Amino acid sequence: GAGVSQSPRYKVAKRGQDVALRCDPISGHVSLFWYQQALGQGPEFLTYFQNEAQLDKSGLPSDRFFAERPEGSVSTLKIQRTQQEDSAVYLCASSLGSKSYGYTFGSGTRLTVV
Amino acid sequence: QKEVEQDPGPLSVPEGAIVSLNCTYSNSAFQYFMWYRQYSRKGPELLMYTYSSGNKEDGRFTAQVDKSSKYISLFIRDSQPSDSATYLCAMTRNSGNTPLVFGKGTRLSVIA
């Protein structure tokens, strides 16, 4: 596609519910990042994939957060047993090469936990 | 103290004004500096990218990096209402796919 596509755009989850957020990167982009952006804050790094390999997951806040990219294209961020502090916009970014400035961000999924 | 500090504003200026946005940082290992623009309910989009110290100009936008002071700036000349957005500074240690560290963003409104 022309850009990074994320779905759903909005998700409301009851506390304790599991959610799955999807990212479709730009075709051919090998690098994929997930960031979390709380209200009024800048994005914070969660995890990084190069193709299907998860090379860095140091930003995942707890073991309730899990990400995968099994075929090196679409990625899913899963949050188990959601808590109110998980409410944020989850941004996906992809990059063709290895330069840190070459990311294209999606519009994000806004997760609200009630 | 966060690694990257940025005044969240909001900042309101009249159309045509020169806008100055800035960030300070504490990690001397940062070498690559970026400015992103984020419209409401959209993802960040890259505006400017600078390596190490110096200036870079692109149209109405100028980015400056002063590594000795750990201070970076973005200047917008002849500001337009369409420049109204949140501006995020970001930085990283190297050009490989290391995570970006963002400031919290400055919300700018340009009034016609």
Image (cartoon, rainbow, N blue to C red):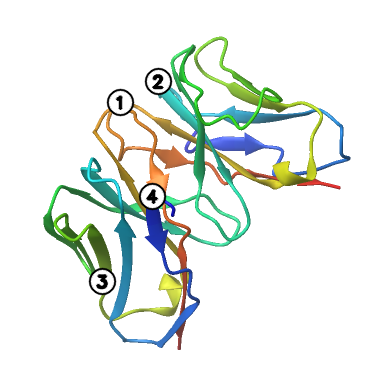
Instruction: Name the residue rendered at 52%, 18% in the picture.
Output: A73
Q: Which residue is mark 3?
A: B75
- Identity of the residue drawn at 40% across and 20% down: A30
Same chain for mark 4 and mark 1? The answer is no
Q: Residues within 10 Å of mark 1 (few under 14, many from 20)?
A: some
Name the amino acid, label 2: Val
Mark 4 sits on what residue? B3
Mark 1, residue position: A97
* Picture disc at residue A79: none
Q: Nearer the viewer, mark 3 or mark 4?
A: 4
Q: Earlier in the sequence, mark 2 or mark 1?
A: 2
Contact between marks 2 and 1 (CB within 8 A): the answer is: yes
Which residue is identified by label 2? A30
Please give the chain letter of the residue carrying mark 1: A
Camera-side mark, 4 or 1? 4
Badge 4 density bin: few <14, some 14–19, many ≥20, Cα 10 Å: few
Q: Disc 3 on helix, strand or loop? A: strand
